[in-house]
Amino acid sequence: MNTVVAGITFRAMLGRRRIVLLILLPVFLIGMAFALRLLGDADQATAVSLLQAFSIGTMLPLLGLIAGTGVIAPEIDDGTIIHLLSKPISRPVIAQTKFLVAATMLVLFAAIPTYAAAWILIRGEAGIALGFALGATVAGFAYAAVFLLLGVVTKHAVAIGVVYALIWEGLIGTFVPGARKFSIQQWGQTIADQLTDVPFLKSDVAIGFAVPALVIVTVGAVVLAGMRLRSFSLTGDE
Amino acid sequence: MKIELSQVSRWYGNVVAVNDVTMTIGPGVTGLLGPNGAGKSTLLHMMAGFLAPSNGTVTLDGNQVWKNHHIYRNVGLVPEREGVYGFLTGWQFVLSAAKLHGMSDPVSAASKALAVVDMEAARDRRVETYSKGMKQRVKVAAALVHDPAVLLLDEPFNGMDPRQRLHLMDLIRQMGASGKTILFSSHILEEVERVAQHIEVLVAGRHAASGDFREIRRLMTDRPHLFRIRSSDDRKLAAALIVDGSTGGVTLGPDGLEVQALEFRRFTWLLPRVAQANGIHLQQVSPADEDLESVFAYLINRSA
């Protein structure tokens, strides 16, 4: 990791309007948790369905998209990335640093709020808070890596990311059970399922598949992003 | 240090941007001159390790440039696009460059670099509040913060006011005189002439000419020139001019004469004398093709 690259990336992420996007969804999640508690619906089933549908199902992929592409795509777009790339720092190190920044963002803005929302609803009951927070963390890492890679590879990273999250994970994953096997969201839920003991949370993907899949996708995407940055080209306007 | 390009070509699909260029850039200031779209940026990006040649090799002191981040210890790059983080102050931007280079004393290196480009007064303002010329100067400061032996600048004078331009020209000349290898691109002959000892001309992706500015200037003046002339008796003047070998062709039209001068100097010497000897009054003599495009067009035909 390079601390200067990390510092600049954090400032770029947090210093501007993007922070509003990052804060909005977790604030909504925690607001929902408070509202449910006030309404007296604070039981395990409610907590699990809120975390499953909103926290891991909606917030995590969206924040993953914002953080994962946000740490690099705007810099590639406006050419500021040259400032980092024209230095004697290996490009894979730059990719790894960008990944770490995005992953940290997801812990801060997705995993911790997930834990907080569960805590507000049911405290530490049945390991739900911890399970979902860890599920969100590891799935967040995978999202950060995949969307970082997309940001390096294509100018249309956000569009492709939205299509993946909404169409593949959201729509196709709902109707085609087989597709769920190749869904970061589902892998995250599997982790959450493993760490909680509630009978009504049932994941579709076996832990024996989800864990290696998360590791391979995360590491693979970061490595590929580094390789791709090594051959980063300025094609100019000519 | 020396940048060597050997039979370098770069194409995008069917479009050839740089075509079989071989050149060596050594210590001193070299100007890369060519009209817009000649492939200057493409060539410069290949020298800076930001583009792979489709063919041929680009090396820095014998080391491959492409996919080699170690070259940046010795190379400073000033890209044409703004490419400066707007949310950083000028100071933070240059300091970050010094730190990214892993310098032992980044603070003093950054102060020195900002002083060199005369940007100390505005160093604590955010870059997004800078004028284009000021952004250009902090970019230069960031590029030379590690005192590189090689400096590559893509159209560095664009957007600068005349005072800033003179300042940067001085700076480039000084660095060249101190033995650094400096290459900058420009589409303006006068700019290149004033700063560069050596000029490489690129036209339509091809290496059209190479030499010191006197040679390039001579190439550009010794080409055939086209003049439009109005006089008290165009017909008589045409007849008198045709006799002399320095004119290639004379066209008589309703708007006067168009004369193709083969030898610029002889023709400009001859014209007033011929007119005087024949009792003709010259009312207008104007060069018809003095723009840089036609100069380049000539060079490209010559090199073809």
Image (cartoon, helix red, strand yellow):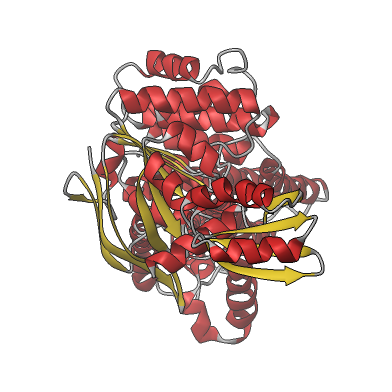
| B264 displayed left or right of B53 | right
Relative image position of residue A11 (x, y in whole percent): 57, 34
Camera-nearest residue between A219 and B231: B231
Relative image position of residue B22 (x, y in whole percent): 27, 58
Q: Looking at the rendering, which quadrant does residue B113 occupy?
A: top left
Q: Is residue B208 above or below residue A130?
A: below
Residue visible at 36% across and 65% down? A211
| B30 displayed left or right of A118 | left
| A186 displayed left or right of B132 | left
Q: Is residue B46 above or below residue B176?
A: below
Q: Is residue A174 above or below residue B188?
A: below
Locate the C terminus of chain B and report the quarter of the image it occupies.
Answer: bottom left
Residue visible at 30% across and 63% down? B8
Residue visible at 38% across and 65% down? B303
Relative image position of residue A212 (x, y in whole percent): 33, 67
| B69 displayed left or right of B134 | left
